[in-house]
Amino acid sequence: MRDRLFLTAMLGPSLALLLLFYGYPILDNLRISFTDLSLLGLKRGGSWVGLDNYRELFQSGDFGDVLFNTVVWLTATSVAIRVLLGLAIAVLLNSSALKRLRLATISRFALLIPWATPPIVAVIIWRWLLDPHGDVNATLMRFGLVDQPIAFFADMRTVWPAVVTVMVWNTVPLIALSLLSSMQTVPEELYEAAELDGATRWQQFRHITLPFLMPNLLVLGLMSVFWSFNNFVYVWLATGAGPGTFTNVLATEVYLEAFVNFRVGYSSAIGLVMALVMGVFGIIYLRLVAQRQLEDTL
Amino acid sequence: MIRHIGAAVLALTLGISNIVAAEPVTITFRFNDTEAEVRGAIDEFQRQNPDIKIDLQRIGWRDAQNQFLREAATGGGPDVIHSAQVWVKEMGQAGAARVLDDFIKADPPPNGFDDFLSQDLARGPGEKIYGLPWTTDTWALVFRTDLLKEAGIDKPPVTWEELRKASADVFKKTGKAGFGFPAGSSASGAIWFLANFYWWSHGKALIIQKEDGSYGIGLTPPDVAEAMRYYKSYLDGGDNPKANLAASDAHDPSIVRALASGNQAMGAMPPNTYQQVLQAYAEANHDKPAPFFSAPFPHANDTKSSMIGGRMLVVNANTKHPKEAWRFVKFMASQQVFASYYRTQFPAQRSLLKNVDFGAPMKGFAEQFEYARTWGPYASGPIPIGAMWNATGRAFGAALSGQRSADDAAKDLIQEIGKLMASKR
């Protein structure tokens, strides 16, 4: 009983803070999502509309397209590329060849540059690079790979790959450096023993390195999914959700509804649906994937 | 002893209160263009009013309105706000803008409020005045004379068909872009203006006010699709580079640069963007006369083809210093400011506007004023202009990029505007 009281007393302040900083805004957002609150009526408040906002959202013809863009392009594609590329870079940075050439330290510093670049700057740099008069088009033309410059951020065939490129460039260093730090905790003796047993490089990676990386990979994967799904800044700055509505995602839809169409209530409903989707994903991920993997590994 | 301490406390208190009294009142002014445009005027105001200090804040046009509405709703925000003319009614509705009628009555501008253009847009709930019209402008077409000459064009186009042909001829004969307009679909994209100019010049409008005072949609899907197809033909023909699908503003660097460097023959823009083009040309070609002229958009004798737009100054309903804020607003709209400092915009007062020397390159803008209209029912109607602007930009973006056919995108737009109108009723 005394232990329980002690635990409650110790955890109480943290729980209260969590409730204050997370619980209250969520509940207030939920309340607003059941109203027709307008940006022009913030002082007056909105009127109760029940489930109308949710009904409208799910019946909206655009919702499927926006959800597809968010799940497939913004999240699945960018996270998959980011994790695979991050893993490849970490392996390269950890390789003995790079150390022998005395390039390991400088490579790690170089990797920090994209990560330290603010997203707004990253988008501007890439908009210049991918401009029809930019260096990428100039190079493609010089090697005869294209006849006409490509408007990467305006052409429907290239706009999503261009946005994903900017996201990956700006964020892959975090994944690579995190995985690199995990790789450096693998005892050298394990590789030596494996080598004596005749294991190939691939077998060493598959059966020694990867299990050590797994806990970190799972957490990075989960964080990347949350971060990408809710991301607003890259799409908004690079394309403004265009051309047309071609790159509109849930986060830009929230902004457009709240601050362009002034529909704060409806926008809150979209925000809550986003939170719900990520909540369900997080639970499934932790229960079905992460828990099993971590049990196997540990 | 006690008497001495009392005297000391009193002296200290008086001293502090004197210091406090000497402190100037700080008025925060949030301006949405470059600081250089108004810095001189602000410094002059502070010289003339040593009891008022102006704290200049800057924000981009894109976020200016919603940022202020959010701040005002919680009792904050700057004292004076630079606003698009079409936002003022909405700011009044939101309770964010202070009513100015009492100030205008007690301490009116030199030629009274009737001297100002766009008075209809300054009024909000209860027909009260919520903003002082500050500047006015219109959009016009601008041309490079050298590229037109090279393409064999000796006079500016006066119909939409002639404009289309001139643009195609420039591209065909010089390899340079013809009419390079920003075709992007952002929530505040320039295609909104171009679409409306096309409709207005054909005697139609997206929002109309009926005889009984109610509002309606003045376009059919075929009207919208026709405008979409017209502008899309420039992109399909290659005379407006496809890269301009990613440009949403008239002042997009790629457009300003292309005009200034001679890679584009024609553009559509407000006067301050045109001045940027002229300045960029002058910087790159020191002694050469600028090969540019401006001309009105195509129009019929009885139709308009551009808007009388501009900005207003709004006093925050939460300001603690309304009198000082009004003194600043009145000064900024004075002849002295437009004559000596704020030279990138035209004044919104008829008495000052008639004295403006537009000069040869700006002649087209002066002519365009004759064929320009206010947003009228768009602003006084039930739908926030920003929502229509966004819906129009998205629909045009979808059609121009090929995401949707012009017919489908046009139907979507009319349906969306209808939905917005029904929900606001």
Image: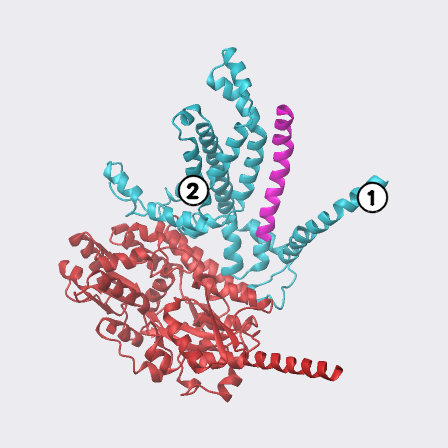
Chain colours: A cyan, B red
Q: CA distance from mark 1 to mark 2?
A: 49 Å
The quarter holding residue B14 reads bottom right
Magenta-highlighted residues: A269-298
Q: Chain of mark 1?
A: A
Mark 1 residue element: helix
Q: Chain of mark 2?
A: A
A142 vs A190, left or right, is: left
The residue that disc 1 covers is A5
Tag 2: amino acid: Ile
B8 w.r.t. A273: above or below: below
Tag 1: amino acid: Leu
A159 w.r.t. B392: above or below: above
The residue that disc 2 covers is A113
Residue B223 is situated, as x and y percent measured from the top left of the image, at 36, 61
Q: Callout 1: 10 Å neighbours few (<14), some, many (20+)? A: few
Mark 2 residue element: helix
Q: Nearer the viewer, residue A253 or B275?
A: B275
Numbered label attached to residue B357: none
Q: How many marks?
A: 2
Residue B39 in view (yes/no): yes
* Residue A283, magenta (yes or no): yes
Residue at the far right: name it.
A1
Q: Residue at x 35, y 74 (%)?
A: B342
Q: Nearer the viewer, residue B291 or B389?
A: B291
Residue B283 is situated, as x and y percent measured from the top left of the image, at 24, 62
Residue B268 is situated, as x and y percent measured from the top left of the image, at 29, 63
* Residue B392, magenta (yes or no): no
A16 vs B172, left or right, is: right
- Circles 1 and 2: CB atoms closer than 8 Å: no
Q: Nearer the viewer, residue A45 or B409?
A: A45
B276 w.r.t. A200: above or below: below
